[in-house]
Image: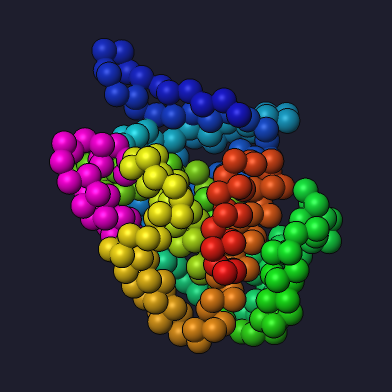
Amino acid sequence: RRIVFIFRKGEREPRAIKKYGKRAEIENEFINHQKASHLFPTKIPSIYFFRLEGEMGDLCMEYVSQTRLSDIVLSVWTGKKKRFLREMRETFLFLMEILKSLPFQEGKVEDSYSYQIAKWAMDNDIQKVNQMKETRKVEEIMKEVSGIRLPLCMQHRDFCLKNILYSGMQGKMIIDWEDSKERELPVVDFNMLLVSMIQVYQVLFRREKGEFFDESNITEVVGEKREEIRQYLGVEKGIFEKISILATFSLWSQNLKKERFKIAEEIFSFLNKELS
């Protein structure tokens, strides 16, 4: 995939971004982007044009300032950890705003894409997942939650800090919808966001990933937001914990399938945390 920034003569900021790549990938991103833009138009960049030619396609959309959470934290001289915590809270609020904008449709756990891709990963033993003890634990969980009905909704499935842009007057915007699915467990994006926050925390403060959960202020925010989602969905605690583990396993499976091994490793580390 190739990305090109489009400028007007004499201007320093781009006016648009053009993506060029394989037909199926570009078409899928366009379709998912359109679905999302109908639900929360002010949180998604506008599409200027979309074109398919032969085996390739291109997609041109509005340019949004490339400022991210890490840029904001690094911009302050003192109190970086306080600023990180504040921005973390604000980003979770943004996630909740998106979640509460989504229509829900009741379905069984096994109707969700998370369940289906997890089963696919096991059936195909992708990257030898069946040799791992974690897979056997998740397999047991899948049996336990099979048949349980709960609200399903659209999820971005790559709802991470690199895809959340801080655009000044417009507020936060979310980009790159190529992985999104419509019938999903509503905790998928929360878990993906949390994995990315752990990554950014490590880089910003030069800490080990395990130290993220040693910070009482951070664990308080994470616990508070997880509980808010659980209560919003009306799901019993034990069931919520199990579908959260399934959601994380599905993110791991998805990134193994796409050969995004670095992020798959981070997700696997988080999965171990959940299972323990």
Task: Check the image and tell me how it is coloured.
Answer: rainbow
Total count of labels = 0
- Magenta-colored stretch includes residue 75: yes
What residue is at 39 percent from the left and 45 percent from the top? 207
Q: Residue at x 73, y 30 (%)?
A: 55
In terms of depth relative to the viewer, which is nearer, 269 or 118?
Answer: 269
| Residue 140 visible here | yes
For residue 36, above or below residue 245:
above
Residue 9 x/y as whole percent: 31, 13
Viewed as shown, does residue 245 lie left or right of 127? left
Secondary structure mostly seen in the magenta stretch: helix
Q: Is residue 124 left or right of residue 202?
A: right
**Segment tinted magenta in the rendering:** 69-95
Q: Point out residue 88 in the picture as x, y percentages from the top left corner.
A: 31, 55
In this view, the residue farthest toward the left is 78
Quarter of the picture containing the C terminus is bottom right
- Reply yes or no: does residue 271 show up in magenta: no
Quarter of the view holding residue 245: bottom right
Q: Is residue 85 left or right of residue 16?
A: left
Q: Nearer the viewer, residue 273 or 15?
A: 273
Could you tell me residue 20's position as x and y percent?
A: 58, 28
- Where does residue 258 sit, x and y in percent of width and height? 68, 43
Q: Give the position of the N terminus as an image quadrant.
A: top right
Quadrant for residue 169, please give it: top left
The residue at the far top in this view is: 10
Q: Residue at x 46, y 85 (%)?
A: 234
Q: Is residue 119 above or below residue 31?
A: below
- Residue at the location (22% across, 44% down)? 80
Q: Is residue 22 above or below residue 41?
A: above
Q: Nearer the viewer, residue 220 or 44?
A: 220
